[in-house]
Amino acid sequence: MAAPLRTNRDFRLLWMSGLFAVLGTQMSALALPLLVLRTTGSAMQAGAVGTVSVAAVLITMLPGGVMADRVERRRLMRLCDVGSLIAVSALALAVWNGHAPIALVLLTATAAAVINSVYGPASFGLMRAVVPPDRMGTATARLQARTATARLVGPLIGGALFTVHPVLPFLAEVVGLLLSTLCVALVRTRSRSLKAAGPVLSKRELTAGLSFLWGLPYLRTVLLVFGLGMNFAFGALTFTALTVFSDSGRTGLGGGFVITCTSAGSLAGALLAPRLNPERHTWGLILATCWTCVLTAGVLSWFSSPLVAGLLCALCTCLATIASIGFLSTLLVVTPDDRVGRVQSAAGFLSSLVQPFGPLAGGALLTALGSGPAFGVLAGVLGVSALVVTLAPSARGGARPDADAEPPDASEDDRPRSDRPRSDRPESAGTPGRANAT
């Protein structure tokens, strides 16, 4: 049995680094569109910030995974922090001088998205070198709790700071990035894959993570149905609830309550996960999440109440967070060290691919059918996904490498983690008693 994570120095540093970085990102995520709206008065241009960010993430996510498998991961994280620091500092200086052109704002948002596409896979790869396999579930839960907390309080702090002066959220992010860089620099563990990836833009390297996921039926089924399908449908559900209970924009109380409950549910799930050992019960948790989402959409199709919607959405996100922690813990343990960056970025890519279209679909259903029928259609879509996960033998089988077929291009370096040597870690960092994008 490995020592508790509280005595793992490098994990604590990675956790604090991520907290500072994510908190700063969440503050600026709200401040950027507000800055554009204040400068131009155009809601369309303000919305373009989010669109550009999502597009940049989707385009660069797979190459970012390749980079995380080519470069020593701690060094790559430091370079990412420095790049983010330069971009945000330039924007903060422009805001302070009273002239922040839309081109600079979009460039900053794009740079942040691209850098995050590299930083995320690198941080997961380094965490796997820092945390023993039997502590991976607890470590993943703590990272999720950290991120959920930052997402809950970051926009509130960012909005308050922006009200005082538009430059303050960006200055706060600069400070956070400085602290994040310092924490990463103090990490002693090094993590480089034993088999370096090839050219970043080669088809083989870009699809290596997708090939690995496709080669294990459990990972393939869960990501396609739970990660991709359920994310899309639940995004449509939450947007529809936000619109309905905000009375089409005339009041923000009902919709704001639903969104706050959703964020609180995610935080509650991350805090509960270490007590439930989700990596041992992932399939059951996925089933519970799917059918709870079906129940939520079905109830809302008949009963319109922001209180009920908020509580049910909180329950959905709580269960989804616990299930996701179990799935991610399993994914990190079974992934070969030389592919951990590419596999993590591929999983994120699949989970995010259609998520931006969820609100669009929800809005279209609401416009065409009205609130009740729209929730009813979403209940049907969620029900189909739930049935697939319930009945698919591959979802019940788990991701045991000894039970599933190896990927078509598996090699000696693609063996399960327990059969391979650890990454190139110093001896002191490998001891259990020694003291993390996302």
Image (cartoon, grey):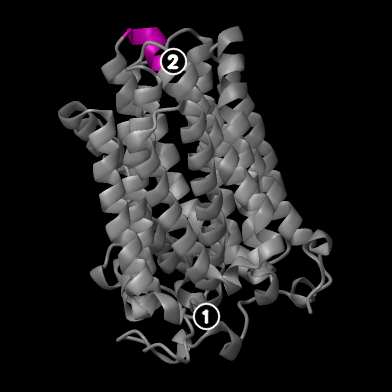
Helix, strand or loop for the magenta stretch, by majority: helix
Indicate whether 199 appears above or below 185. below
Between the C-alphas of marks 1 and 2, the distance is: 45 Å
Q: What residue is drawn where x is 31% and y is 56%? A: 383
Q: Can I make out residue 101 in this image? A: yes
Image-quadrant location for residue 218: bottom left
Indicate whether 80 appears above or below 260. below
Q: What residue is drawn where x is 35% and y is 27%? A: 49
Question: Dot 1, how many residues are within 10 Å of its Cα: few (below 14), some (14-19), or many (20+)?
Answer: some
Q: Residue 428, how many percent across, how many down?
A: 80, 74
Three-letter code, disc 2 = Leu
Pointer 2 residue: 35
Pointer 1 residue: 194
Helix, strand or loop status at disc 1: loop
Q: Report how many numbered discs are placed on residues in the image.
A: 2
Which range is magenta? 35-41
Q: Residue 430, how many percent across, how many down?
A: 74, 75
Helix, strand or loop status at disc 2: helix
Residue 321 highlighted magenta (yes or no): no
In the picture provided, is 52 more to the left or to the right than 118?
left
